[in-house]
């Protein structure tokens, strides 16, 4: 790189020496970067503009539960729920949506999901901010998918919107469990178990599965529970335990 | 001083991983030596602002990392290579280093050049577009080093950086360390005493969570002279002698283990 006066050029003349004030290493790095780099996709560019942070945007588009395969799988489950709702009259979308969202949230961010979790914790963009952005994005996407499926199934508006609050509570439970146990699978299990118990409890009390969804009196308990789980997740994400086998 | 630790401790339940460590380090390469379980990784994780101390005072780059604002500023100027580098198998080398450059909030216009320069520095230019799952352990280690140096850090913390590197790569890495140590504080945790001898200006030896020696590599080597301590090289003998004396409570070699908080060699 430092051999500025190189071999003769193709025309037989002497190749020009680089001016002494030109940092050829930097020039090469700039050229190499253009060859090696991958242009951000439209979703990442949009996220970067909205969040005003290219780092957060990149962290967002690498969320496992926002990858295309996961989103398609979630949409298929909810579409199946819409079909079942139309054919049976039971609001299956409202029952499935919180469970699907909880699984997505558990796989959004955390020590059990991110291979480079340890490294991420030492970054300028805090892990809590990454957690918040990813969790909100996963929740938002699942809410949109659920609302679309619910509207397509033609259920009453109270049921269509009634599952959003339980979904918040179930998602918060999944997130707290995933963060505390450092395992996304444990988060999924906790979310599904919590939601199943709620549904069965409502059925025992009211005789309908959907009672856990549409009951307006449950809104406050759901929200308080969600807030408590959110606090647990927030605190747990900042409590860095050492990786296993290190001292 | 870029690193100032005063009586720093970290407990995990009843285990005292780091026990009242005091240390100061300025510009140069600082080696942290010690047997497995000595507390090197916990100490490095506290310096990386990943693990909060249980007690004691920690000041990095003249700032207190307990507060959010200063912690952000420290992290902006920090490079860290953890002992267990997790990676995304589907990322390319460039993607991985770029991801962490972005998370370190490098100015976006500087990112491509900084990433390419870091990859070149660790000799992975020819594998920049290779997926991480296709790389060997040594190459992954170099990717980890590249992400650590991508922001040209003032404080660079490397936990077992030469693990998995072949001898040629290790020599190149030591040269890189010496170069980085000209302008920043580099703290290297290692169990390889030859790394310390080749690259470090200052060394601390840890055992059971405490620093039992701090001084120059030459002083560590001298501590083993005439002691009959085990080892093939002077540094290894010094290492063995200091550890043996710390565990028995008697002075090693020509004098007792030097106390902490000594100025590093220029």
Image (cartoon, rainbow, N blue to C red):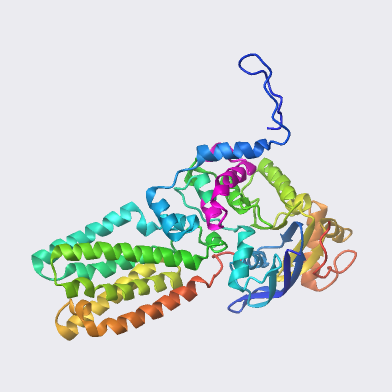
Prevalent SS, magenta region:
helix
Q: Quadrant of residue B58?
A: bottom right
Image position, residue A28 (x, y; %): 61, 36
Q: Between A64 and B60, which is closer to the camera in this rendering?
A: B60
Q: Quadrant of residue A15?
A: top right
Q: Residue at x 52, y 56 (%)?
A: B86
Q: Is residue B145 left or right of residue A57?
A: right
Q: Residue at x 43, y 56 (%)?
A: A49
Q: Magenta segment: does it hold B139? A: no
Image position, residue A33 (x, y; %): 54, 40
Q: Is residue B256 left or right of residue A8?
A: right
Image position, residue B48 (x, y; %): 62, 64
Q: Residue at x 52, y 43 (%)?
A: B135
Q: Quadrant of the C terminus of chain B?
A: bottom right
Q: Is residue A215 left or right of residue A117?
A: left
Q: Residue at x 61, y 14 (%)?
A: A11
Q: Is residue B221 above or below residue B133?
A: below
Q: Is residue B118 above or below residue B189?
A: above
In the current view of this chain or complex, which residue is farthest to the top?
A: A12
Segment tinted magenta in the rendering: B99-128
> From where the camera sits, is residue B139 visible?
yes
> From where the camera sits, is residue A110 visible?
no
């Amino acid at each position: 790189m430092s051999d500025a006066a190189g071999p003769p050029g193709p025309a037989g003349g002497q190749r020009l020496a680089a001016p002494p004030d030109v940092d050829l290493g930097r020039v090469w790095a700039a050229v190499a970067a253009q060859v090696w780099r991958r242009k951000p996709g439209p979703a990442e560019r949009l996220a970067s503009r909205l969040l005003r942070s290219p780092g957060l945007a990149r962290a967002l588009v690498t969320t496992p539960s926002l990858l295309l395969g996961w989103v398609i799988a979630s949409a298929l489950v909810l579409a199946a729920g819409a079909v079942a709702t139309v054919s049976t009259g039971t609001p299956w979308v409202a029952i499935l949506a919180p469970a699907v969202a909880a699984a997505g949230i558990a796989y959004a961010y955390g020590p059990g999901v991110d291979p480079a979790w340890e490294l991420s914790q030492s970054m300028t963009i805090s892990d809590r901010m990454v957690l918040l952005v990813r969790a909100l994005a996963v929740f938002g996407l699942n809410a949109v998918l659920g609302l679309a499926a619910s509207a397509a199934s033609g259920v009453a508006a109270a049921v269509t919107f009634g599952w959003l609050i339980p979904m918040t509570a179930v998602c918060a439970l999944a997130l707290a469990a995933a963060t505390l146990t450092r395992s996304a699978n444990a988060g999924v299990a906790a979310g599904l178990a919590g939601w199943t118990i709620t549904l069965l409890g409502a059925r025992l009390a009211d005789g309908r599965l959907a009672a856990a969804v549409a009951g307006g009196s449950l809104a406050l308990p759901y929200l308080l529970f969600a807030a408590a789980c959110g606090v647990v997740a927030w605190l747990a994400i900042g409590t860095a335990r050492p990786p296993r086998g290190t001292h | 001083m870029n690193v100032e630790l005063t009586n720093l401790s970290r407990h995990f339940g009843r285990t005292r991983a780091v026990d009242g460590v005091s240390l100061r380090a300025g510009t140069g390469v600082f080696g942290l030596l010690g047997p497995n379980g000595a507390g090197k990784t916990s100490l490095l994780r506290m310096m990386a602002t990943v693990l909060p101390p249980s007690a004691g005072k920690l000041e990095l780059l003249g700032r207190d990392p307990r507060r959010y604002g200063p912690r952000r500023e420290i992290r902006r100027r920090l490079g860290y290579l953890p002992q267990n580098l997790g990676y995304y198998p589907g990322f390319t080398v460039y993607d991985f280093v770029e991801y962490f450059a972005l998370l370190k909030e490098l100015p976006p216009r500087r990112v491509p050049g900084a990433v390419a320069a870091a990859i070149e520095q660790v000799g992975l230019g020819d594998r920049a577009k290779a997926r991480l799952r296709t790389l060997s352990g040594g190459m992954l280690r170099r990717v980890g080093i590249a992400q650590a140096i991508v922001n040209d850090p003032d404080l660079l913390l490397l936990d077992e950086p030469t693990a998995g590197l072949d001898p040629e790569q290790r020599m190149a890495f030591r040269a890189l360390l010496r170069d980085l140590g000209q302008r920043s504080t580099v703290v290297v945790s290692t169990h390889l005493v030859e790394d310390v001898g080749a690259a470090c200006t200052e060394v601390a030896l840890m055992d059971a969570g405490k620093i039992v020696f701090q001084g120059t590599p030459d002083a560590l080597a001298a501590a083993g002279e005439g002691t009959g301590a085990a080892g093939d090289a002077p540094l290894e003998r010094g290492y063995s002698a200091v550890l043996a004396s710390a565990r028995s409570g008697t002075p090693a070699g020509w004098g007792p283990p030097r106390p902490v908080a000594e100025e590093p060699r220029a």
